[in-house]
Amino acid sequence: MSKLKKEPFRNIDFSSENPQQESFENYEFINCSFPDLSKLTILDCDFKNCNLSNLKTTGSLLQNVSFYDCKLLGLNFAGSKDFGFEVHFENCILDYVSFDKKNMNKSSFKNCRMHNVNLTQADFSKCTLSHCDFFEALFSGTDLRTVDFTTCTNFIIDPGLNKIKKAKFSLHSLPNLLLSYDIIVEDL
């Protein structure tokens, strides 16, 4: 059973108003802007309709943090702490975001645009993906074992450079897995 959220922060631009706290637990942020979450602890919080583009996360602790209808352009999660790292995204724009070398634990992505995302050496093996667009996303050394890509689009994954054992793909996405082998797949 989830806890009730504390009084939400609404329509605050934290670029001009720095947070007075070092830790936020069980809060909602609605229509807020942030330039920096560095060294903050964010636990069980929801961000709704927030602009978090180019947000700095160096040294931040993000545990069970959910983002709904947010814009997160150019975010780099690589600098956030690995301990307990768990994030969830729904209806978000995640273009140019980096999850480089992140263990994504039980994170989820639903109806997200993930153009030019860096997933190099990330562990996505326990992630849930649904209806995500991976146009020009970089998969290299990425652990994708058991991930279900059947509703996802525009990804190109080289099976020789990534772990894909027991991952699920739809038949129409088969050419996206064979592109690096220069094989021609024709629909009969």
Image: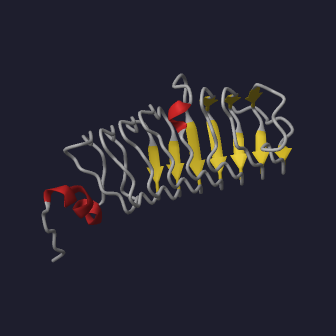
The answer to which image quadrant residue 61 occupies is top right
Residue drawn 39% across the image and 36% down it: 122
- View extreme (bottom): residue: 188
Left or right: 112 in relation to 158: right
Residue drawn 50% across the image and 52% down it: 96
- How many labels, in total? 0
* Viewer-side residue, 163 vs 167: 163
Question: Residue 1: image x %, image y %?
Answer: 69, 31
* Viewer-side residue, 40 vs 49: 40
* Viewer-side residue, 28 vs 116: 116
Left or right: 16 in relation to 160: right
Question: Residue 15: image x %, image y %?
Answer: 78, 44
Q: Judge whether 40 appears above or below 149 on screen.
A: above
Q: Judge whether 183 appears above or below 50 on screen.
A: below
Residue drawn 53% across the image and 53% down it: 110
The answer to which image quadrant residue 40 occupies is top right
Question: Residue 7: image x %, image y %?
Answer: 87, 38
The image quadrant where one finds the C terminus is bottom left
Question: Residue 155: image x %, image y %?
Answer: 35, 58
Q: Judge whether 70 appears above or below 61 on screen.
A: below
Scheme of colours in the image: secondary structure
Residue drawn 48% across the image and 43% down it: 98
The answer to which image quadrant residue 120 occupies is top left
Left or right: 174 in relation to 7: left
- View extreme (front): residue: 16
